[in-house]
Amino acid sequence: MSDQKNKKTVMDKEGIERCLTRIAYEILEKNKGMENLVLVGIRTGGVFLAQRLQKKMSDIEQGKIPLGILDVTLYRDDITASKKKPCLGETKINFSLDGKIVILVDDVLFTGRTIRAAMDALIDFGRPKMIQLAVLIDRGHRELPIRADFVGKNLPSSLWEAVRVDLVEKSGVDEVVIEEGP
Amino acid sequence: MKFERKDILGIKDLSVDEINFILETAESFLEISTRTIKKVPTLRGKTVINLFYEASTRTRTSFEIAGKRLSADTINISSSTSSVVKGETLIDTARNLEAMNPDVIVIRHSAAGAPHLLASLVKQSIINAGDGAHEHPTQALLDMMTIKERKGSIDGLKVAIIGDIEHSRVARSNIYGLTKMGASVVVAGPATMLPRDIEKMGVQVHSRLEDAIAGADVIMMLRIQLERQKQNIFPSLREYAQHFCLNRHNVKLAKKDVIVMHPGPINRGVEISPDIADDPSCSVILDQVNKGVAVRMALLYLLTGGSE
């Protein structure tokens, strides 16, 4: 047994920036502008990515898209099964979702269960016209019929590996790494 | 941090880390009560029994709402409409409830230690909603949450608790909690309402209200338990009010930004004058009630879980 995990960097700072720039353009292209758009970031990684997308989109077009923060813990399907309760973060959506196009943002798309929980949570806040999903990394292994509308990078991975997105806001560095499993 | 308790029986057993963790978790629950749809599916399929052997409006409703907003099924039992009137003992009632497999039992009882007895007998999580003159942990938690929100932190504050300390479980739980969190606590009340050796709980004792609230950041007024007048603890309500009623004049002795708290129900004009109780610039009484739901949601969330 060794503590030294086999770690491989698959995306650096510039790579992440370029991905987000492209996704910002794709969102605006698909929705023909910013009208009716709102961003909702899933805690914690998705929030930072949503903030960056918000800035990029205001740089491209005039105006600012509303940004919400979502903690999906209370909607998870494994919550009552485990005795150990995860820390709760605050959910903050200060605007109505009725009739809006919600761009849901997360860092890694894996089994799809987080996104399922997030969609349930969003519906409790109103009736969006549409929900679209933007993720930085899609690593496969879906357990639910869910797919992303905007993907930074498809990263085929094995189940024994862990994919981690480090962002400056949280970890002090921008990079995506694959580590050997737990 | 890991929260691994089965029961919440009193503030005395909780560590500072645990109190902070509960309060932080409760803050995240505040938002749910502001939504149009005030419900999350977290405790779907869980059952919470509110077993109340004493009268209650706030605490019982608060626990019921907390359970329902988390999608748990909540059942209320009050002693007057239960088999207690047929002579069933607490232990037998508990064993019967246990056989119906609830997940949490919330209990209020006039005997100190009743929740502890229950906790040792049944496998379900027990939450103490007030036991005699012993503890009322959820009230102290919601009080601390209110103070923390208004003042930023509890550490270093001067908190004055005024009134019938002897018979108050609210006072006892708050003294345990506030001193743990670094506040300096002073108490004042008529000598017949101050327990012997109260100093040993780490508080300063005054016999005059004015001395206790001087320079206070927080004033906590306790309910005068009218039913106790018969026991000759105090001569008359009017005399009590003359010495220990918080009003517009004496409140000026406290800090300018003082907050005034009361666990309810209020005896207007006895321990607190209506103009103070209803003054939004200092009274946080209804805010306490609001925080109560969030604190109880947090506890139900933290206590319920699978076997692993």
Image: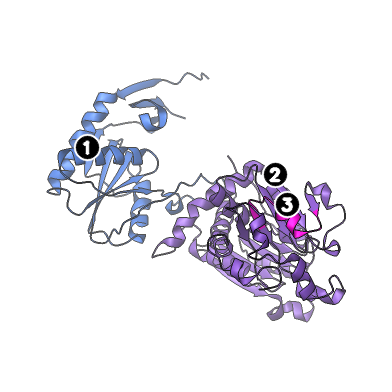
Using the rendered image of the protein, determine whether residue B127 is visible from the camera's viewpoint: no
- Co-location on one chain, circles 1 and 2: no
Label 3 or label 2, whichever comes before in sequence order: 3
In the picture, one chain is purple; tell me its letter: B
**CA separation in Å, label 1 and label 3:** 52 Å
Give the image location of residue A58, x and y in percent: 20, 41
Using a 10 Å C-alpha cutoff, classify the residue at mark 1 as few (fewer than 14 neighbours), some (14 to 19) or many (20 or more): some
Given the image, on which type of amino acid does mark 1 rest?
Answer: Lys
Q: Which residue is mark 3?
A: B175
In the picture, one chain is blue; tell me its letter: A
Q: Residue at x 43, y 61 (%)?
A: B34
Give the image location of residue A28, x and y in percent: 15, 44
Is residue B225 depicted above or below B70 in this figure?
A: below
- Co-location on one chain, circles 1 and 3: no
Q: Secondary structure at mark 1?
A: helix
Q: Which residue is mark 2?
A: B180
Q: Residue at x 58, y 39 (%)?
A: B1
Queried whether the magenta region covers residue B83, the answer comes back as: no
Q: Secondary structure at mark 2?
A: helix
Given the image, on which type of amino acid does mark 3 rest?
Answer: Ile
Q: Which residue is mark 1?
A: A56
**CA separation in Å, label 1 and label 2:** 47 Å
